[in-house]
Image (tube, rainbow, N blue to C red):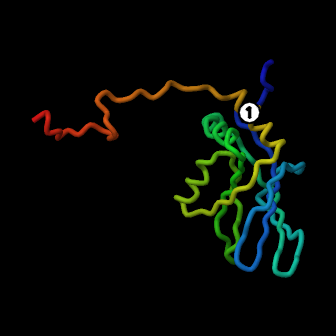
Amino acid sequence: MEPPKMPRYAHRPMTVMMEHNASSWQVIGILPSARPVTGGPRRELVRDGGESKIYRWEGLELTLTPDACDDYWFNLTSQQPRLYVVCQPGKEGEPLPLRLSADPDDSVAAEEAEEWFFQAAMPAPVVLWVRDYVATHYRPGPRKQKIKGKRGDKYKNPFDARKL
């Protein structure tokens, strides 16, 4: 069976649902969206429960790239595939989503850049879409070869006493 045809850089509009209570923010769901992405991300209050509010973010897109297929596969084969929302802090301390990712390494990069990130379970239709993308675009590269004489250190010690 031939894998489905997918563009080299695949894009899918997504909706992010976030809950805010008195002390924290959390992503409560990420869903595929029927609305095309136009302009930047937009926030809309969906429910005001007094101490807890739920917001819907539209205008976000999940983009898949061929160079991250290894990471997508790692994510898909984990116990619970996840999506990551990378945010920057807003003026009032609220998270402002910058991008969505299926690459777990993006959450590490966000932390290093002092951005915020949230994660949520990847919905089943998105799991299938990412799986089809990986099946279409994953190309294993050459395996990294071990350095001769390597014994736990990344580099050989030029001042090795045995050579003096």
Q: Position of residue 94 (x, y in %)?
A: 70, 72
Quarter-of-image position of residue 126: top right
Residue placed most toward the observer, 55 or 148: 148
Residue neighbourhood size for the residue with mark 1, other residues' Cα within 10 Å, grouped as few (<14), some (14–19), many (≥20): many
Q: Is residue 103 left or right of residue 19?
A: left
Name the kind of residue labelled 1 in the image: Tyr
In the displayed structure, would residue 37 be above or below residue 45?
above
Q: Nearer the viewer, residue 10 or 129?
A: 129
Compared to residue 148, the image places residue 77 above or below, namely: below
Residue plotted at (81% across, 66% down): 43
Q: State the residue at coordinates (66%, 36%).
A: 73
Give percent across and percent down for residue 74: 63, 39
- The N terminus, quarter of image: top right
What percent of the width, then of the height, locates residue 44? 85, 67
Is 111 situated left or right of 27 in this image? Answer: left
- Which residue matches tag 1? 133
Outermost residue, front side:
79
Residue 112: % across, % down: 52, 58
